[in-house]
Amino acid sequence: MMKRSTVLLLSAALVAGCSSDTVTIGPAASLTYISGSGQLVPAGVHSTGTLVVRVADAAGNGVEGDTVYFTSKLGATLGTPMAIANAAGLTSTTYVGGSSLTTDTVTATVTGIDGSVTFSLTVVAGPPSVLNIVSGNNQSVAVGTASAPLVVSTTDAFGHGTTGATVTWTAFGGTMSVPSSVIDSTSGMASAAFTPGSTAGLDSVEASVTNTGTNPATIVIATFMITAH
């Protein structure tokens, strides 16, 4: 015959085993901002950060399966205009910078939920895709004498001036003096000087930058022609 204390212990264990920590998830009731606003997005490039929102029920539990609709005020391309919330209620998209340097807003909404989430994004110049000769091409320079500055600038795929790119200078037939190898943030230009060797004739100088906006990255080249006399 079981002692009364043993019976009580078994009963308590059975009750504990039948208890449950299951949380009942209610219908979607709120949409909240998580991250992604305030980014600077290069023109023609996907944002590095995602625009993240969370769908939750009235108790704050994440709700899975609801569709979140993302809309750009300026009609910019989005990674996905519709995204399904995951088990945590989270979902996201990316933003592609357009051709104009401007500030745009992206609004996230869910059908049946009052209110929305707004992201602010600023489009800035994209990666350098064109290397422009500003001045210094087609010079005639005495042998052993430095040329006038060879000056270049860079623009992105939409013609916006870019800065910060490193310019590599390569001389064919002489030597280089490079006072500036980076596109300056103030002038938007970089420059160098060329000194012909000991032989008269036609020499050339190549300036090049790396376009990181392509996959794989490509090299953009501008060529200066210089006549040594």
Image: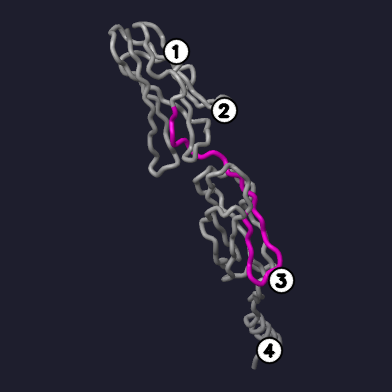
Q: Is residue 41 left or right of residue 30?
A: left
Tell me which numbered mark, 4 or 1, is placed earlier along the sequence.
4
Numbered disc 4: secondary structure: loop
Mark seen at residue 3: 4
Q: Local crowd at mark 2 within 10 Å, few (<14), some, or many (≥20)? A: few
Residue at the disc numbered 3? 58
Mark seen at residue 148: 1
Numbered disc 1: secondary structure: loop
Q: Amino acid at mark 4?
A: Lys
Q: Local crowd at mark 4 within 10 Å, few (<14), some, or many (≥20)? A: few
Numbered disc 3: secondary structure: loop
**Range covered by the magenta-colored residues:** 106-132
Residue 114 sits above or below residue 47 on the image: below
- Closer to the observer: label 3 or label 2? 2
| Residue at (64, 93) in percent of width and height | 1
Q: Is residue 111 left or right of residue 157?
A: right
Please identify the quarter of the rendering in which residue 31 is found: bottom right
- Closer to the observer: label 4 or label 1? 1
Q: How many angstroms separate mark 3 from mark 1 (CA)?
A: 71 Å
